């Protein structure tokens, strides 16, 4: 029982510390972000094996404060380039920068792989490819190879509308109903019109036209249709 109790306390303490840290530390990580996670993980996991629960929580709190100080310092333009690494150019104007590849220790096949993931197959079509300080690679194609934008054709497009989830995994999202100033009775009435039950709905969203779109957990069969081919033995 003591082991279970200590594990729960350590887990909850770690969760609180990460929430205090904010989203940045667990999204795109810089070098000291990653170091922070490693050190904090080691500190909060120690009490599971040894009897140092109080000290671990204190050390963890100190580490959180130190990390928050570093984040604050990184907002200063002069200190930012000390704390963060500078971006490294890998391709410029279609030419591969071998010095940049050597600096980041990236083989050519890995660079080509990163380009393919972003939809580019020819390095000659790339205006600029940069490895950011987070380790991700940003790619800017040459103007003649970039996707056409509505502005290129002098077209006016309406503002993008993001469907708002009202039911997810069989559960009603009450705060979204409140945000839209809709009653639960309206939602249930819309669901009943389709003959579905809330617990069977994997996703229901509020559309721009004020209607409810429902995606249930039933997958339609398309036997023999090549457009619905499933790889593997289940096809």
Image: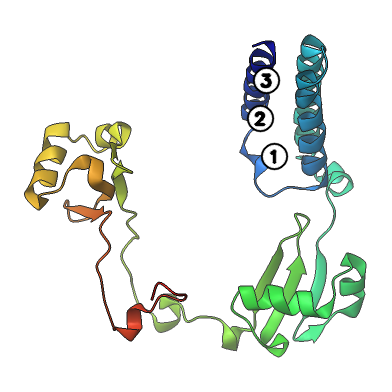
Quarter holding residue 25: top right
Categorize mark 2 by other alpha carbons within 10 Å: few (<14), some (14-19), many (20+).
Answer: some
Question: Badge 2 is on which residue?
Answer: 18
Q: Is residue 197 left or right of residue 228?
A: left
Mark toward the start of the polypeptide (1 vs 3): 3
Q: Is residue 183 visible?
A: no
Q: Is residue 7 visible?
A: yes
Question: Badge 3 is on which residue?
Answer: 7
Quarter holding residue 69: top right
Q: Is residue 171 left or right of residue 112?
A: left
Categorize mark 3 by other alpha carbons within 10 Å: few (<14), some (14-19), many (20+).
Answer: some
Mark toward the start of the polypeptide (1 vs 2): 2
Categorize mark 1 by other alpha carbons within 10 Å: few (<14), some (14-19), many (20+).
Answer: some
**Label 1: which secondary element:** helix
Give the answer, above or below, for where 119 lies relative to 45.
below
Q: Nearer the viewer, mark 3 or mark 2?
A: 3
Foreground residue, 173 or 199?
A: 199
Q: Position of residue 11 (x, y in %)?
A: 65, 24
Q: Position of residue 231 (x, y in %)?
A: 46, 76
Q: Is residue 11 left or right of residue 80?
A: left
| Marks 1 and 3, how far apart at CA | 23 Å
**Label 2: which secondary element:** helix
In which quadrant will I find the N terminus?
A: top right
Question: Badge 1 is on which residue?
Answer: 25
Q: Position of residue 212 (x, y in %)?
A: 19, 51
Q: Position of residue 222 (x, y in %)?
A: 26, 76
Q: Is residue 112 left or right of residue 80?
A: left
């Amino acid at each position: 029982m003591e082991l279970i109790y200590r594990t729960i306390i350590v887990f909850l303490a770690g969760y609180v510390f990460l929430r205090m840290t904010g989203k940045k530390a667990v999204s795109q990580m810089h070098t000291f972000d990653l170091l922070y996670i490693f050190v904090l993980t080691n500190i909060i996991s120690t009490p599971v094996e040894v009897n140092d629960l109080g000290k671990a929580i204190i050390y963890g709190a100190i580490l959180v404060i130190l990390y928050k100080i570093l984040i604050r310092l990184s907002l200063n333009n002069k200190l930012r380039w000390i704390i963060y690494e500078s971006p490294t150019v890998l391709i410029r104007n279609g030419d591969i920068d071998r010095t940049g590849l050597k600096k980041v220790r990236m083989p050519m096949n890995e660079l080509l792989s990163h380009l393919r993931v972003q939809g580019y197959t020819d390095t000659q079509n790339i205006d600029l490819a940069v490895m950011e300080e987070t380790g991700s690679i940003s790619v800017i194609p040459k103007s003649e190879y970039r996707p056409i934008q509505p502005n290129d054709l002098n077209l006016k497009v309406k503002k993008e509308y993001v469907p708002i989830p009202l039911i997810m995994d069989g559960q009603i999202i009450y705060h979204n109903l409140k945000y839209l100033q809709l009653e639960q009775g309206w939602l249930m009435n819309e669901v009943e019109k389709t003959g579905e039950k809330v617990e069977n709905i994997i996703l229901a969203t509020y559309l721009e036209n004020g209607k409810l779109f429902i995606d249930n957990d039933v997958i339609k069969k398309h036997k023999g249709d090549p457009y619905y081919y499933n790889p593997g033995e289940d096809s």
